[in-house]
């Protein structure tokens, strides 16, 4: 998917370049430069977001390993309770992920609409 996005952006840039050539494009160039200035901070935020996600995933893995260890010590009754709870938590995490994805798509559409 990432690859498709990059390819799409490349096509957009190529298309814009062709438009600029046709227009002679002084005003268009100025507008694009302003757009680029506005997007730079966003790109940095996205980079930080990815790092943050990686860190959270590691913390999550450490946390679940710790939890499994505690459960092994706690005995069968507690393990049964935990197994009932796990699918619910996973479902909740999935819903949150989908909500974040929908929000990102909405922002991207909004950005493209304004561009």
Image: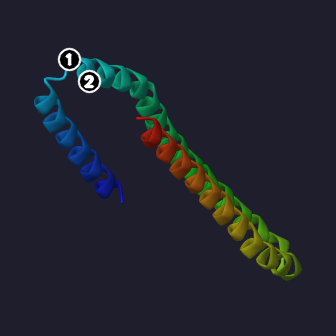
Q: Residue at x 81, y 79 (%)?
A: 84
The residue that mark 2 highlights is 28
Q: Specify few, some or many for label 2: CA neighbours under 10 Å numbering under 14, 14-19, or 20 or more.
A: some
The residue that mark 1 highlights is 26
Q: Position of residue 94 (x, y in %)?
A: 64, 65
Element at label 1: helix
Find out whether the residues at labels 2 and 1 contact each other: C-beta distance under 8 Å: yes
Quadrant of res 4: bottom left
Relative height, residue 80 to residue 67 (above, below) = below
**In front: 75, or 16?**
16
Residue 41 in view in this figure: yes
Q: Position of residue 71 (x, y in %)?
A: 78, 70
Q: What is the number of the mark on residue 5?
A: none
Left or right side of 71 for 17: left
Relative height, residue 113 to residue 96 (above, below) = above
The quadrant of the picture occupied by the N terminus is bottom left
The quadrant of the picture occupied by the C terminus is top left
Quadrant of res 32: top left
Q: Position of residue 101 (x, y in %)?
A: 56, 55
């Amino acid at each position: 998917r990432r690859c498709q996005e990059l390819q799409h952006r490349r096509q957009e840039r190529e298309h814009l370049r062709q438009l600029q050539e046709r227009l002679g494009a002084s005003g268009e160039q100025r507008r694009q430069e302003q757009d680029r200035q506005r997007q730079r901070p966003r790109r940095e935020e996205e980079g930080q977001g990815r790092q943050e996600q990686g860190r959270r995933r590691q913390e999550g893995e450490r946390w679940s390993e710790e939890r499994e260890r505690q459960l092994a010590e706690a005995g069968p009754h507690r393990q049964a309770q935990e197994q009932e709870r796990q699918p619910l938590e996973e479902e909740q995490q999935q819903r949150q992920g989908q909500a974040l994805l929908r929000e990102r798509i909405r922002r991207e559409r909004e950005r493209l609409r304004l561009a």
